[in-house]
Amino acid sequence: MPVTLKKPADEVDIASAEYGPLLRNLQANILWAHGRNFARHVFVRFTGTPAAVKAWIGATAATVTTASAQLEQIIRRESDDHFDGGLVKGLFISARGYEFLGFDTRRFEGVFRSGMRSQKANVVEGLKGSRNKDPKPGTWDPGFQREIHLLVTVADADAARADQAADEIRASLAGVGEVLTIEHGTVLRRTNAAGDKEPVEHFGYFDGISNPVFTRRDLAKELPENAQRRAWDPGAPLSLVLTDDPLTNEADAYGSYLVYRKLGQDFALFESRVAALAAALGITRELAGAMVVGRFKDGTPVLRANAPSPGPEVLNDFNFEEDEGGIRCPFHAHIRKANPRGTTPLTSLESERRRRIVRRGIPYGKPMPGVADGAEVNADPKALRGLLFMCFQHDIDDQWEFIQRTWVDNVIFPKGILFQQDTGDDPLIGQDADEAQRWPKAWGNGGAGKKAFNFESAVTLKGGEYFFAPSLPFLRSI
């Protein structure tokens, strides 16, 4: 009997026999992050005959890592810190790739079929006052300007092994496909107050906080400070991230939609705008940066404090109903725009929670000195660096596209009307270059009013595409 995807996370005993077929049919890195420090993302345009490409995919399917294998590795790692699970491989197909192979893409959701390069408008664009503000594809990195059919990802604890795996993929594609670009990702880490090395991004903020979790065992790992879950439950049903693979009839054969965006991070611009914002408001740079992101670099939510307050755990049990006026955490702060936590007008908390995505990104480029521990650095603030953003979801239209267009890039969300813009776009990942945000003049003091200031986002889209993560039954049968 097929599994039920809508169970709450605390009822999902993922290690039970009930979920065995689902995990064996599902690719890794969807329900759990792969945990490797080095990743190589190989983007491919098919050049061989459809029959030759299908034969290559069928042969490659045998080396794709399953969620079942990944869970076994996670459990073993918990009892053996030295365990090395080896290479993790994933295979993802774009709508144009499916069409090249002769499959009917009408079985897939709408924005996936259009592709990222089409820059299709969001379905509620007119109603919400938002639009697609991404840079035009002609400005993207060359490797993303042509039609992409396939993405193969490999990740390993050893950089040389990851490079070798990418080279082997390139060699195996001779006569079948052309490699358009290979993107290199490396996890950056910094030691937190508890002595743990946690992921950090290039601007120096701890990253990966507040991802949804899908199983009882993952909920049990929640940090002690957030164990009560009075204000925010990180749990989510499997239906948030999984969907039936439309091209196979096998039971419990699920896939997931993948959004991939290469984001450039201009460290010099970010630091200069943080300094300018701090001067304009008469506050510290630390607080100005926290108002942009929604957290201080140590993870402290600006909702709860106007200065860093490092503790052994990162506080995540909060919602923005505590700050209805946006005078501690601005309405446009990144973590509030991307996850309003119960403050979206005219909708329910449950409806809002169904918009969440599962982030699996990884930084690229060398960090500035002081950002990460033990990493090879580049002291040039204008050096090429950024994030290879990846997220999985049940439906791109209803999840990532809605978040980016209707929340992040919408200058009137969540507070404002068409002719009175009281919010502004997300200053971190928003793509509106000339829209001022509304910043509290004094943290926690609503009577002080707000000040308009255009932060000018230092994050720019360099290319990307929408993909589907096929089930293993489909890949093996192709």
Image (cartoon, rainbow, N blue to C red):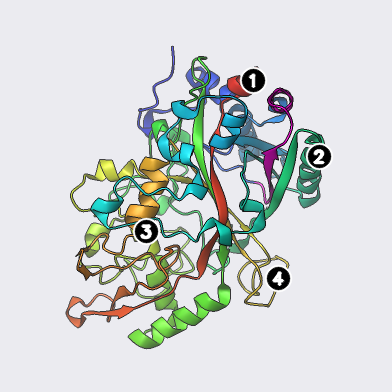
* Residue at the spot 44% in from the left edge and 77% down from the top edge: 286
Q: CA distance from mark 3 to mark 2?
A: 39 Å
Q: Position of residue 130 (x, y in %)?
A: 32, 57
Sequence-first tag of 1 and 4: 4
Q: Quadrant of the C terminus?
A: top right
- Label 4: state its secondary structure: loop
Marks 3 and 4 sit apart, C-alpha to C-alpha, by 31 Å
Task: Establish if 287 lies above or below 185.
Answer: below
Mark 4 crowdedness (10 Å alpha carbons): few <14, some 14-19, many ≥20: some
Task: From the top left corner, tell me how far across and down residue 327 is, in percent.
Answer: 25, 72
First to last magenta residue range = 36-58
Kindly state the secondary structure of the residue where label 2 is placed. helix
Amino acid of disc 1: Ile
The residue that label 1 is drawn on is 478
> Alpha-carbon distance for marks 1 and 2?
22 Å
For mark 3, give the secondary structure.
Answer: helix
Name the foreground residue: 136 vs 42: 136
Q: Is residue 221 magenta?
A: no
Mark nearer the viewer, 1 or 4? 1
Camera-nearest residue between 419 and 327:
419
Q: Of the two numbered discs 3 and 4 on the same chain, state the one appearing first in sequence.
A: 4
Q: Identify the mark nearer the N-term, 4 or 2.
A: 2
Callout 3–callout 1 Cβ contact below 8 Å: no
Q: Which residue is mark 2?
A: 168
CA separation in Å, label 1 and label 4: 44 Å
Q: Which of the two marks, 3 or 4, is nearer to us in this view?
A: 3
Q: Secondary structure at mark 1?
A: loop
Q: Do tag 3 and tag 4 residues touch (Cβ < 8 Å)?
A: no
- Which of the two discs, 1 and 2, labels the residue nearer the N terminus? 2
Q: Earlier in the sequence, mark 3 or mark 2?
A: 2
The residue identified by callout 4 is: 377
